Every structure is written in structure tokens, then in C-alpha cells.
Amino acid sequence: MIKLKLFSILIFLLVCGCASTGNKTLGSFDSAQVTTMIKDGVTTKQEIVAMLGDPSGIDLDHQSREKWTYTHQKVTSKAINFVPIAGSFQRGTNNTVKQLIILFDSNNVVSKHIFSTSLSETNIGLLG
């Protein structure tokens, strides 16, 4: 019975301790996968849409090239948030942001792309 309760609590924490926004497909990729999928001078706009869907942002760069941006953010609660009493003194999250910026030439082919992953954390509470 105790094992069932512990398992239930663990499942609850796993489900409630995480949130994500943005392009879910991008969230599952790392730098090596993006490099394999997108080839500058080769990959077309249509192939990008087939792989990642519509971008979260479309803009023009200083050379009037079309610039697409894909973003994914994942926020995970720190384990201490769920510890009674201790969670009142220090709480926080671990954050991961992935961003892909793609520039297209006049033929709708990728001229350049940049992928980045940034890690950060938030801390709040009396000891935060």
C-alpha cells in the first residue's frame, strides 16, 4: 500500500512539475539533429514547414532576407518545491529555451540558420 502511495505521489510530481510552450517539435531536437536536418543552401522553406510547422515569428533582416524564428521553452519545478517546510524557504524552476533562426534567400532556400539552447533558473523564497 505504501509503495502505491509513493508511486502515485511520484506520478503527480512528474505531471505537475513541468510546463512547456512554443514549438514542441523543436523542443525534442538538439544542435546535432538540427545540423543534420537543415543544410544551408539546400533545404527549402517547404521542407522547413514540413519538419517544424509554421514559425512563431516572421521578420526581415537588415538585408531584407526573410527571417523565421522557432522557439520552445520548458520550465521544470525544482524538487525542493515539493518538500514540506523547505519549499517555503526556497523554491524555483529550471528553464530551458531553444531557439532556431532561419534566413531564406530569394529562392526560398535556407541561406543561414542558427540554433541555440540556453539554460537558466529562477529562485524565490527566503533563501532564494
Image (cartoon, grey):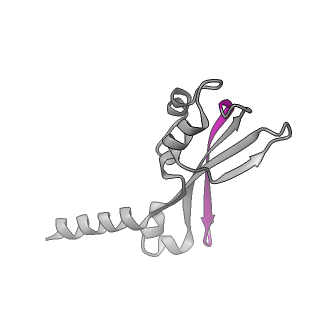
Q: Position of residue 76 (x, y in %)?
A: 49, 59
Q: Nearer the viewer, residue 36 or 65?
A: 65
Assess whether residue 113 is covered by the magenta stretch. yes
In this rendering, position of residue 57 left or right of residue 22:
right
- Residue that lies at the very extreme toward the left in this rendered image: 1
Please tell me which residue is depicted at 48% across the width and 70% down the height of the picture: 86
Q: Position of residue 26 (x, y in %)?
A: 52, 45
Q: Position of residue 113 (x, y in %)?
A: 66, 33
In this rendering, position of residue 57 left or right of residue 85:
right
Task: From the image, give the main secondary structure of the stretch colored magenta.
Answer: strand
Assess whether residue 77 is covered by the magenta stretch. no
Q: Is residue 104 above or below residue 41?
A: below
Please tell me which residue is depicted at 85% across the width and 36% down the height of the picture: 63
Q: Quadrant of the N terminus?
A: bottom left
Please tell me which residue is depicted at 61% across the width and 37% down the height of the picture: 45
Q: Tell me the quarter of the picture where residue 73 sits.
A: bottom right
Q: Quadrant of the C terminus?
A: bottom right
Please tell me which residue is depicted at 67% across the width and 45% down the height of the picture: 68
Q: Tell me the quarter of the picture where residue 41 sits.
A: top right
Tally of numbered discs: 0
Q: Is residue 29 above or below residue 54?
A: above
Which residues are the magenta region?
109-126
- Residue that lies at the very extreme toward the front in this rendered image: 107
